[in-house]
Image (tube, rainbow, N blue to C red):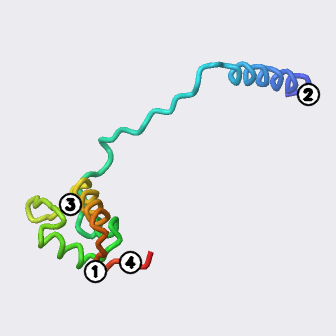
Amino acid sequence: MNHHDRAAQIGRLIAELTTLMSDPRPTRVEPTPTATQRVLFTVAEAAEQLGIGKTTAYSFVSSGELESVQIGRLRRIHADAIAAFAARLVSTNRSVPGADNAA
């Protein structure tokens, strides 16, 4: 490709870019589908989200303070149950044994 052809190609690309940039239509970003988001977590994963130890989380599950479901031999905690538990802690301003409460 010679210098003249290259310059012509660059000119066409610049013209196309200018047209694309002047397009008044906003670029729309589609949200990711929520179906791919997890809703059930292991006790260890819930403990990590709450910032508490796994043993502490299991004790809250055993006492019923942290609601969980049994699926066969597996124990899972719904994302809403994690949020509700955290909200109850905040509303009662209660510290959790086993958590880093220095914050």
Vertical placement of residue 67 versus 31, above or below: below
Q: Residue at x 85, y 21 (%)?
A: 8
Residue underneath mark 4: 101
Q: Which residue is drawn at 58% across and 25% down?
A: 26
Quadrant for residue 69, please give it: bottom left
Q: Work out how far the residue at label 1 is from the one at label 4, CA to CA, in angstroms.
A: 8 Å
Residue underneath mark 1: 97
Residue farthest to the left, as pictured: 72
Query: What x and y, as percent, mark residue 93?
Result: 31, 69
Label placed on residue 77: 3
Vertical placement of residue 13 versus 34, above or below: above
Q: Which residue is drawn at 8% across and 61% down?
A: 72
Quadrant for residue 44, please give it: bottom left
- The amino acid type found where label 2 is placed reads His
Q: Of circles 1 and 2, which is in front? A: 1
Q: In this view, does 66 lie to the left or right of 13?
A: left
Q: Work out how far the residue at label 2 is from the one at label 4, CA to CA, in angstroms.
A: 69 Å
| Contact, mark 3 vs mark 4 (Cβ under 8 Å) | no
Q: Residues within 10 Å of mark 2 (few under 14, many from 20)?
A: few
Query: What x and y, as percent, mark residue 19?
Result: 72, 18
Q: How crowded is mark 3: few (under 14 residues within 10 Å), some or many (20 or more)?
A: many
Secondary-structure class at tag 3: strand
Q: Is residue 13 left or right of residue 84?
A: right
Q: Work out how far the residue at label 3 is from the one at label 4, CA to CA, in angstroms.
A: 23 Å
